[in-house]
Amino acid sequence: MVQCGNAKLLNFTTWPMQILAEQKSGQVTGFLMPKVAGMTPLHEAYSPAHRRQDHPEWGWNFLVYVARNLAAAFHSVHEHGHVLGDVNQGNAFVSAKSKVVLIDCDSYQIDFQGHKHLCEVGVAHFTPPELQGISSFKGIVRSPNHDCFGLALLIFHILFGGRHPFAGVPQKSGVGDSLEDSIKQMRFAYSPSANSRHLLPPPRSIPLSIVPSGIAKMFDIAFTEEGKNARRPSAKEWVDAMDHLKDNLKVCSSNKGHHYYKGLHSCPWCSLESQGVIYFNFAVTAGGPTSTFTGDINKLWAAIQALELPASIFSPPTHIRALTPAALPPGTIESPLKWIGYAGVVFAFFAIAHEAPKLTMLWLLIGGFLLYQIANFGEDALNAERQRRRQELSAAEAELNNVIEQMEREAGIVEARHIIAEMGKLKIRFDGLAAEEQRALLDLPKQAHQRQLNEFLNKYYIDQAKLSGIGPTKLATLRSFGIETAADIEWNRIIKIRGFGEVLTRTLVDWRKEKERIFKFNPTRGVTDVDRRKVQQTYVSIRQDIDRKMRDGLQKLQSVKSRVENTKQRHYDRLQVAFNRKAQAEMDLRAL
């Protein structure tokens, strides 16, 4: 390794620099390599809990640079013909300037003068699907494509808050029992095809949509059949992708600590914070600056109400052809003609009764017989025709309704109704926030004990506790569900995670209780300015999220209004035919 080392490798790795040997015998006793000092382990950089405590100033823009530099470090190893092999979260360290240095070079697969010195170790939850389940790495020749699975996984960790791409919520039995099984079966929980893979992201996860579609596709290739059977995105391709991402970031207008891809229409971190999920908690200090809400919800709501969207896209056609009732089939008499017959018989009865009173009884019998015959003449045929015309009217109404429903879907009328309903709920929520925030501030003294306890428990990391049964794979799963410190541990939260039964859940809960017992409440501390600012910042985030959602809603509603007329014109002929059919059917039925 010393012989094949060079300046580029030394820039990215702790590559051995010099051999140490006995002066007399020449026997190798060790080697010199660069010392990693003043740097942070990679897993602490992408862990929200560690970052909040130790580096609150590191935002998503910093992490994008870290991901880029990690890929560059992998590329430097690959372009020299070597392979890391044992890729894992402990492989790298990060500097305050986002430089990445790879360590553990002595386990790399080294290609020197045509001979490969193999890497015979590995970490299960970073091992690609094609190597899952093997009993030993002895004799296994690794490839850059194997490394690129682990690289993609680390980049996913960095960009998505430490979440593991194969940890999620199973949608059927036999799925998600372990990370290794999910990797082997390529159940990428954030994939567009996640439903068919029966594993969905954990609650309140960062969505894959925060990255450009090209990068999302790279993750999907790296973690599914395409990457296994062909080729995963290379380290150089990840460098280029991260360069593109870092050059296309924007700063949130509401929170200067939030950076996100400029192709998104709003800040995803504000949205997550409104749900109580904080990934980037820039230190709130007494007297320090905090974000403020500058939106105008009343103006947005007035604009939404002023749109005057139609309740329905349907309006009768302006040109309706002249309609005449359909002729009756042979053997039937229209109802009006029967009434004429009834009138004729009655008239004849009174005429005969007046002119020949003696024949009144006879004519009464004859008239009754005639009335009966008129009433029943063609009745079966008439009833059948009436039923047929009712069915035709029902079919015509169904056809017209189908045309209208299709037009409303295309124009977005149905969606608009839902949006307006949601906007109304958001407006009510916003109007109640001032009182809710005031109550939260007034409740601060009552919550002092719990607040101090949470701050205390947040300083104890599960990955540093060395708990029985909680190894690297379980830690990765816990982190994927947002559980990193003693403060995150709750029985009901952990017992629901596949692979964590009562024993492991009890282990974690008991460890939390152990830390709770050494906590000492400070009653003199009271409520600080920082405590108040944290509450205020929480409600700023909620207001910003409501503002974002209402702006999005207004934009969608405006597009619906412009789509309505286009949809009407496109379907005018179909609407005309359906409307005329219904009008004709109504007239035909009324004629009976």
Image: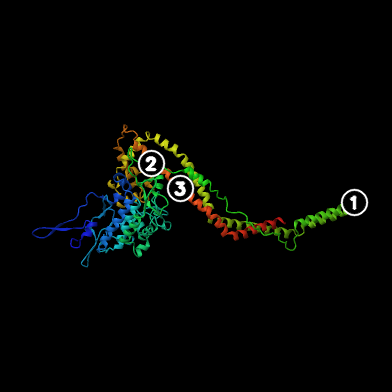
Q: CA distance from mark 3 to mark 1?
A: 86 Å
Q: Which residue is labeled 1 in the image?
A: 354
Q: CA distance from mark 2 to mark 3?
A: 18 Å
Going 20% across and 52% down the picture, which residue do you hit?
35
Mark found first going from the N terminus, 3 or 1:
1
Residue 366 or 233: which is nearer the viewer? 233
Q: CA distance from mark 2 to mark 1?
A: 101 Å
Which quadrant: the N terminus? bottom left
Q: Which residue is labeled 3 in the image?
A: 549
Q: Is residue 224 among what the camera can see?
A: yes
- Find residue 571 and report its image quarter: bottom right
Q: Which residue is labeled 2 in the image?
A: 537
- What amino acid type should be assigned to the residue bearing mark 3? Lys
Q: Secondary structure at mark 2?
A: helix
- Find residue 77 and report its image quarter: bottom left
Q: Disc 3 vs disc 1: Cβ atoms closer than 8 Å?
A: no
The residue carrying pointer 1 sits among few (fewer than 14), some (14 to 19) or many (20 or more) residues within 10 Å by Cα, namely few
Q: Disc 2 vs disc 1: Cβ atoms closer than 8 Å?
A: no
In-image side of 247 versus 314 (left or right): left
Q: Secondary structure at mark 1?
A: helix
Q: Disc 2 vs disc 3: Cβ atoms closer than 8 Å?
A: no
